[in-house]
Amino acid sequence: MVAEDSDTPHAPWRRRAEGGDRCVQPSLRSDVRAAVPDAAAGFGVTAAVFAVLWFRMRSGTSATTAVMPFMADPGTFWMYLLSQAFGWSALLWSWGTVMLGLLLSGPGPGRLPVSRRTLERWHRTTSLTTMALMAAHALLFAAELVRYETRLGWAARLWSAFADTFVPGWYDSGTGRTAIPIGQGALYLAIPLGLLFYVRHRFGATAWRRLHRLTVAVYALGVWHTLLYGTSVWYGEWPRTVLWLLQLPVAALLLVRLLRPARRGERPAPPGPGRPRPGRTARRAVRAGGLVAAAAAAAGILAAAATGHDGGRTRPPAPPAGPQPAPTAPHVHEPG
Ligand code: HEM
């Protein structure tokens, strides 16, 4: 999830060292250092979301508690809440970094009061922060499972929590059988796709750029995972509508990026005679497919938000006062 590479005229981070010809390119180390303020903001947003989720659970208005009534105690389930909060900041940061990437590889900063180089730096730092937030989300879910599985010995607890969280196909209950591998797919693809940027010279900028385009699909996996499994957006209520609507700018910018790519080589050749470029038909087909997919996504998002047919479930009536159902596991929530 880092900036498009630049053998382009923009030459993003291609900065001539003073008085010399050497190109100064960002390294992973320099970007990690530059990402510190951004990561601090990510953790701050996580803390704010955590506070909201805690308050809602304590006040009895939490959708998570409506899905899993035994979870009505935020003091016990604080790690679960923190995992959810990291999930939201991870999704927000991936939204931001994907928007920045599409801006850079499409229309560019335009009238925005920031330079292209600044946008590129933000794209790289927000991408690193996204990876950290995603990892924290998964790790806290694993930690909650370790805390919860008191019936098992320590080794079995650690193994079961690790496998349920990180081994694709291991988790074997309800919606999680589909939703967890989708989240794992997003996590496992986002990390190499982001970090390969720093070693792209080993396999070529063109190959890297092609791989890097997959990040839009990785982002879509994160959104899909959330819509399927997030209990805060489980019901067809306004938080779910907002989540759908937030995807509209991504689809719109993807359309603009495909119509007005920054790289000259990606623009459709002007009509008229000329030497046919190799692979032009295949490129045209891919581009047309991308345009149709982005337009369909934008139309689908609008339709889901406008009609309310957005995959949300119906909230059940409040449970009667008295003893609540016995806890099964903090992560077992079935479609209601
Ligand atoms: C190993 C990978 C992952 C695992 C095991 C995992 C696990 C989970 C679980 C169990 C939930 C349900 C929590 C609830 O009750 O709401 C959840 C929700 C969520 N996940 Fe993930 N996830 C993974 C990857 C991701 C990634 C990569 C993203 C972000 C792009 C993400 C974002 C979210 C969000 C936003 C929610 C909704 C939280 C809420 O409803 O409050 N997850 N995840």
Image (cartoon, helix red, strand yellow):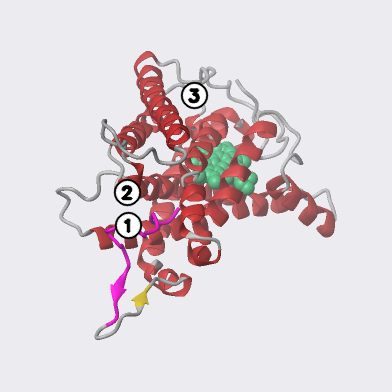
Q: Nearer the viewer, residue 144 or 243?
A: 243
Q: Tell me the quarter of the image containing the C terminus.
A: top right
Q: Is residue 141 magenta?
A: no
Q: What residue type is labelled 2?
A: Arg
Q: Give the range drawn in magenta.
A: 1-17
Q: Which amino acid does label 1 sit on?
A: Thr
Element type at marker 1?
Answer: loop
- Location of residue 39 in the rendering, given as x and y in whole percent from the top left corner: 41, 62
Q: Is residue 57 left or right of residue 269?
A: right
Q: Is the magenta stretch mostly helix, strand or loop?
A: loop
Q: Gap between marks 3 and 1, in whole Å?
A: 46 Å
- Location of residue 69 in the rendering, given as x and y in whole percent from the top left corner: 60, 31
Instruction: Give whichever of discs 3 and 2 has the lower sequence position.
Output: 3
Instruction: Give whichever of discs 3 and 1 has the lower sequence position.
Output: 1
Q: Which of 49 and 299 is in front in this view?
A: 299
Q: Which picture quadrant has residue 298? A: top left
Q: Gap between marks 1 and 2, in whole Å?
A: 6 Å
- Location of residue 6 in the rendering, given as x and y in whole percent from the top left corner: 36, 59
Q: Do the residues labelled 1 and 2 touch (CB within 8 Å)?
A: yes
Binning the other alpha carbons within 10 Å of mark 2 as few (below 14), some (14 to 19) or many (20 upward) gives some
- Residue 8 - label: 1
Binning the other alpha carbons within 10 Å of mark 1 as few (below 14), some (14 to 19) or many (20 upward) gives few
Q: Which picture quadrant has residue 8? A: bottom left
Q: Name the residue under label 3.
A: 235
Q: What residue type is labelled 3?
A: Tyr
Q: Are marks 3 and 2 in contact (CB under 8 Å)?
A: no
Q: In this view, does 310 lie to the left or right of 15?
A: right
- Residue 263 - label: 2
